[in-house]
Image (cartoon, rainbow, N blue to C red):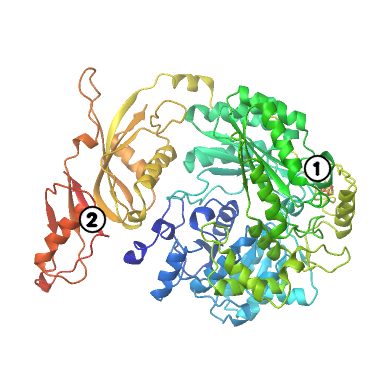
Amino acid sequence: MNRELLLSVRKPGRYVGGEFGSVKVSGYNDYRVAVCFPDLYEIGMSNQAIKILYREFNAIEGVSCERVFSPDTDFEKKLKENGLFLYTLESETALKEMDLLAISIGYELAATNILAVLESGGIPLFNNERKEEDPLVIAGGPSVTNPLPFGHFIDGVFIGEVEDSFDRTLKDLRDAKRSGKSRVELLAIIDADENMWTYRKHKEGRIAKKALWNNFGTRNLTNLPVSSISAVQDNGIIEIMRGCPNSCRFCHAGFYYRPYRQKKIDEIVEEADFLINSCGYNEITLSSLSSGDYSHLTSLIKALNKEYGERRISFSLPALRINTFSLSLLEELSHSRKSGLTFAVETPEDSWQRSINKEIDKEKTIEILKEAKKLGWKVAKFYFMIGLPFSYKEKEEESIAEYIDSIQKKSGLRINVNVGTFIPKPHTPFQWAYQLTAEESFRKMVWLKTYFKQNRNVKLSYHTPFVSYLEGVISRGDERAGELILSAYRRGARLDAWTEYFNKDLWEEVFREADWDVEAETCRERDLNEKLPWSSIDIGVNNNFLKYEYRKAAGARITSRCKTVCNHNCGVCNDTVLPVDNTKEYINISINETEKDSKQEKNTDKYLFKYSKTGKAVYLSHINVMNIFQGAFQRCGIDIEYSKGYNPKPKLEFAHPLSLGIESEYEIFSAFLIDCSNDEKVIVKRLNEKLPEGIVVQTCKKLRPYIQGTKKHSLMSLYGGSQYALTVSGTMTADNLYQDIENFFLEKGKEGIAEVKINIDEKSGEELIIDLPETGTKLSNI
Ligand code: SF4
């Protein structure tokens, strides 16, 4: 690990691994897989697919799986300048040394990141340039159900759900490695997998079928790395239902993950317990495409709140459908205000809603919002789309404005609105539809923005039209879209999903220079009989059903939701594949009432902890360390006291925040432990088992109880100073050293240095090695 390099880039904690729960790589002879989410660490660590892959693959005998995420632009540049390769977080192995790179593609805008990961990892960009020793590159995920734009970069695309099906292929690849098979033979294994799309198969007209995990539910609950630096979603996620019973005609996931399968309630509880007690999460999202459709949702939330509410664990739900929303559910959600109220209405007029097969009762919406206001909510968030088929030619923006105005006035809540542009997705009834050009979309967005400019109760934001257009280019594109991605990548496009990185001019230039009309080809309505670029993929839903649905949309006709006895014949269900409902209403979880009552009498003691922060932990900020200790206490089942009020915080007091980049052998903090009868040594041992690499608690001491009427001292007020040892590198004279040190502390705003201990290499005489101000070791607090 190149310390100097890491300390010169933004958020170096992204590149060091060592998190609690990450695996220790031992089997270097195993079949070595790197799972990759092609975006920055904090996005990738929030992604559920990566967690599933990591657990699945590491559970296979003879397979070891590590993680890699996209490098930020500064890190990518530094790797290149130093002749280094992007590496896995667990064992710091260059990607080119791995056997398999498995990329989960969650959105089209990750396209250039994929190329950056390949090239930074030392893997040739084009599959036909890869040699015997290069890893296989396999992609998967909802955004590659039209793999053609990626066809020349990827060796294969796995279509569908990895559980079980991809495991089998992975075992075959492992066995092939053990018996020394060649790259050609490994590619033949991929080709033979009926769920794998490859460019070769596509050209031959061979179909790749979607893999379906017909046994959806809890698997092993192990090996889940908990992010040490703040992730975009620092919460535990439980997938309570896969698929969705509603057939919203624009929704790719709704068709791709058919049929819907609800997780058993006991499995949800088991997962909640694991995420809270073993991983240390205190916010849990009950996620699915439409969580409101989960049977007995209210009683589930009620039971979870009853069990975990006292421990300040909150449960939230992503966007809900008004039609499945009940007032009792609202009441349960009000126990945990962290759950925002979010409604995806999509389009305002009744007939347009019927066209997209998503009816939202406006009167019920207003009723829910009024009740929410009574229960204390102040804001609700709404999502709309413009450019939907059969409404884009109308004054849809004016209709959206009217709708928002009306619900805001009638409910009295503040309304945040986000408007996106419809993008036709493969494998949906709208796959043939027209897409608004960036300019058409922009005009509508500006109209809406201007309309609400003076309205303090409505905050309107919109998804950048050009970005939606770019998504459309890739979403329905063919090999030519792949050429555009490559051209943009070569010109420096990276992290296109990030506003601060997205370079519209660069992409416009790429489109201008293409030898085909990118806009006309992207946005045009397709003929129903046209051969589409994703025609070599069968996700189970037959084409005639999609065409029928498209015609029904034109007539604003509704298709009823999926159910176990269904006559829609979309092609997915059969004798063995059926929707799965949770039939059990939850009754009780585990803790008995007497146990809970005994917790009313709380005995709280203050403890002082001494810990060291070295190695990988050097790249963690002070705030990261505070969060890590909070999670570690929860993981080892030691209750700590929280502040009172609306947003309680753990009462952890740190004496002296340590800057990122500085090691310390001696840091201190205090915490109030509740009903802790453990011996101090046992507390230290238990904590150390739950901390990430580099943070080690050395001692812990119970402090004398505070005596009423005496002065209270904060830890910081007792802090006298620190002793530092500086690691010296580079050349300078001894006379200058002290001056430099003084300047360093003055720069940092520190005065009154009590003592500076300098380790000088005796052999080098007056020639000293110095590296200031980035590195150093804090030896102790005085
Ligand atoms: S066959 Fe019916 S229940 Fe099954 S996925 Fe299709 S529409 Fe839904």
Name the residue nearer the viewer: 274 or 626. Answer: 626
Residue identified by numbered label 2: 777
- The three-letter code of the residue at mark 2 reads Thr
> Which mark's residue is nearer the viewer, 1 or 2?
1
Residue at x 82%, y 55% (from the top left corner):
429
Q: Say which quarter of the image contains residue 438.
A: bottom right
Residue at x 12%, y 48% (from the top left corner):
754
x then y, percent, for residue 304? 58, 31
* Crowd tier of the residue under label 2, counting other residues whose Cα lies within 10 Å: few below 14, some 14–19, many 20 or above: some
Q: Earlier in the sequence, mark 1 or mark 2?
A: 1
* Crowd tier of the residue under label 1, counting other residues whose Cα lies within 10 Å: few below 14, some 14–19, many 20 or above: many
Q: Is residue 146 above or below residue 304?
A: below
Q: Say which quarter of the image contains residue 540.
A: bottom right
Marks 1 and 2, how far apart at CA: 62 Å
Residue identified by numbered label 1: 353
Name the residue nearer the viewer: 369 or 442. Answer: 442
Q: Does the image show residue 589?
A: no
x then y, percent, for residue 639? 40, 31
